[in-house]
Amino acid sequence: MTSSHHWYRHYEPWKRRFEIGFWVFGFGITALFNSATRMMDAERFGFDVGWEPLVWETTSAVSALMLVPALVWFTRQFPLDWRDWRRLLAVYLLGSVAYCLAHVLLMVAMRHGVYAVIDGSYAFGSWPRQLWYEYLKDFRTFFAIVVVIEVWRAAVRRLHGEASMLDAPDDAPAAEADPPARRFLVKMLGREFLISADGIAWAQAAGNYVNLRSGDREYPLRSTLSGLIARLDPDRFVQVHRSWLVNLEQVVSIEPLESGDANIHMQGGHVIPCSRRYREALRARLPG
């Protein structure tokens, strides 16, 4: 085990806390620096703005921080793929506009709330002019956040290992003549090794990747879920949700839910969602 791999194994349980802390720290430092800069600029030109720059920058930072989960979701729904850059450019430009509108509305609402508490009043100014001004800033912030998210994902994939199907021509759904995939090639930190398809417990779709669970690790595979299903043994693997498939031999039990959906309990204690659309077909495939 390499030192990087060893480090990642210890880091993984803290991954969520680290990511949240990263964004909180980043936006917090940005708010403090921008507040100080505004105060110094006002003093240089002879204006007395008092505490207001701190309120302006803090509300802007908090609003942007609240939108980070939405951008994480957005980038998963529309993952970057340079082969489709024209469509993605239009999608991301529209996304930047939506981001700006949400950011401004949250920010202005917060400022009105703060000023109301101190019996003051806040004026955003001329909305068309101010929106354009804010968009010029939010455009850069939007794409900066997207870049950070994608760079971090690429780094995690490198540490975690990225899988590819052996004997498959590409990631498109395979033709009927293609044999079931028996092994996957995993590249991780300059090394290559094989994992058996039979050892995969489940797979989950995530944008233009599918995460394969094998043992105690997950490996991202650049494929669609339908493309993966077409290359796996249909006697062993079955789709249980629009984003999930499971290995039948690792299913322990099915827990029906009042909604008509179900929870699938897997070996190792993990629980996989099963939608009502696939529930009966799953039960028919299980022995007994």
Image (cartoon, rainbow, N blue to C red):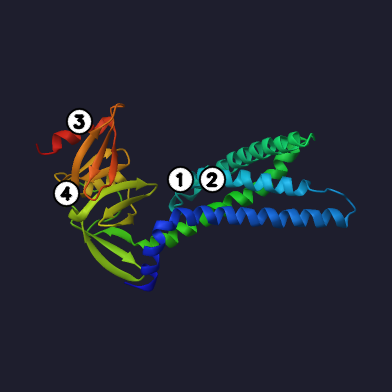
Q: Label 2: state its secondary structure.
A: helix
Between disc 3 and disc 4, the foreground one is 3
Task: Name which residue lies at 32% across and 46% down.
Answer: 204
- Mark toward the viewer: 1 or 3: 3
Give the amino acid type for the residue marked by disc 1 in the picture: Phe
Q: Which residue lies under the disc numbered 4?
A: 177
At x 24%, y 40%, the residue is 264
Cα gap from disc 3 to disc 4, whole angstroms: 29 Å
Residue named by callout 2 = 92
Q: Are marks 1 and 3 in contact (CB under 8 Å)?
A: no
| 3 or 4: tag closer to the N-terminus | 4
Q: Measured from the top left, where is residue 56 in percent x and y?
A: 73, 45
User: Is 69 left, or right, of 218 in this rendering?
Assistant: right
Q: Is residue 64 left or right of residue 262?
A: right
Label 1 sits on residue: 78
Q: Is residue 203 above or below residue 105?
A: below
